[in-house]
Image: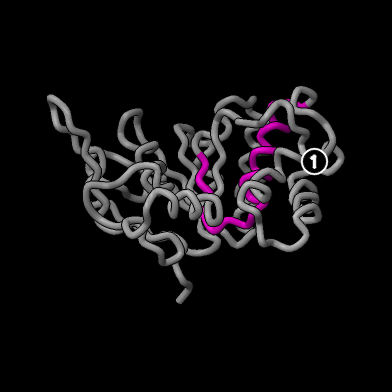
Amino acid sequence: MIDPVLQIRSLTKTFAGPRRRVVLENLNLHLAVGDYIAVMGESGVGKSTLLNLVAGLDRPDGGEILIDGVSLADLDDDALTRLRGERMGFVFQAFHILPYLSVFQNVELPLRLMRSKLDEPRARTLRVLRAVGLEDRAVSMPRELSGGELQRVAIARALVHAPKLVLADEPTGNLDPESATQVLALLRDQVKANHAAGILVTHSYAAAQTADQVYLLTAHGLRVREN
C-alpha cells in the first residue's frame, strides 16, 4: 500500500456568529503520491476554508488532518510554519511574484528562506525552470513576462523545494484560455513528475477536467462529481 501524503478524517469546521454556520462537516479525503484532484463548489461553500485547514492556516473544530503522517493538531505555530515551508507548495490566482527579484531569484527564494538541505540549490532552481520552459528567462524581471509566464514562475517556485503536497487556488483565474490550458497541463504534469500530490480548487469545470478526479464540495460533504 502506498503511504498517504494527505489524510483528512471526519473534518468539521464551523463559523461562530449570530447564526452559527457549519462550513465543513465530517469530511474525509485520502491522497497518495501522484494523486491530483480538483475540488469544485459554489462560492461560500468552503473551498478556501478547506485549503486553509490543510495548510494549517486555520484550525478545525473536529476531525484530523495528517500530512506525511504528521497530525497538524500536534504542531504549534512555529512547527506548522516549518511544515508548510518544507512539505507544501502553493499556487494562487494572484501570482505573488516579487517585482524586484529576477525570475531565478523568485524561484530560488523558498530554498533560501528554509535554508534548504537539498543539494545544489542553484542547479535545482535551473532544473525546475527548465521543466516549466523558462530556463532562458532566468535573468528576466517579472515586468518583462506575460501572465502565463508569471504563473509558470509561480509553479516553479511552488515545486523547487520538492514539496509532498501542492495546493492550487484558482491558479488560472487571471489568464486567457490558451495560457490557462497550458498552465493547467504543466501544473498537473509537474506534480506527478515530482512525486507529489495535488489539490486544485476551481470554479471552472474545464480546469477541473485536467485533474485525475473531480470532487464536488457541498453543504452535505465532499463527493466525486459524476460526468
Residue 151 colored magenta?
A: yes
Residue 79: x %, y % from top left: 44, 55
Q: Which residue is located at x 37 percent, y 53 percent?
A: 76
Camera sees residue 225: no
58 lies left or right of 219 = right
Q: Is residue 110 above or below residue 43?
A: below
Instruction: Name the foreground residue: 54 vs 119.
Output: 119
Q: In what quadrant of the picture does the N terminus appear?
A: bottom left
Residue 175: x %, y % from top left: 63, 26
Camera sees residue 110: yes
Judging by the rendered image, the residue that carries numbered circle 1 is: 134
Instruction: Name the foreground residue: 214 vs 51.
Output: 51
Colour convention: one colour
Residue with the most extreme bottom position: 1
Residue 170: x %, y % from top left: 51, 34
Image quadrant of residue 65?
Answer: bottom left
Q: Secondary structure at mark 1?
A: loop
Q: Is residue 102 above or below residue 119?
A: above
What's the amino acid at mark 1? Leu
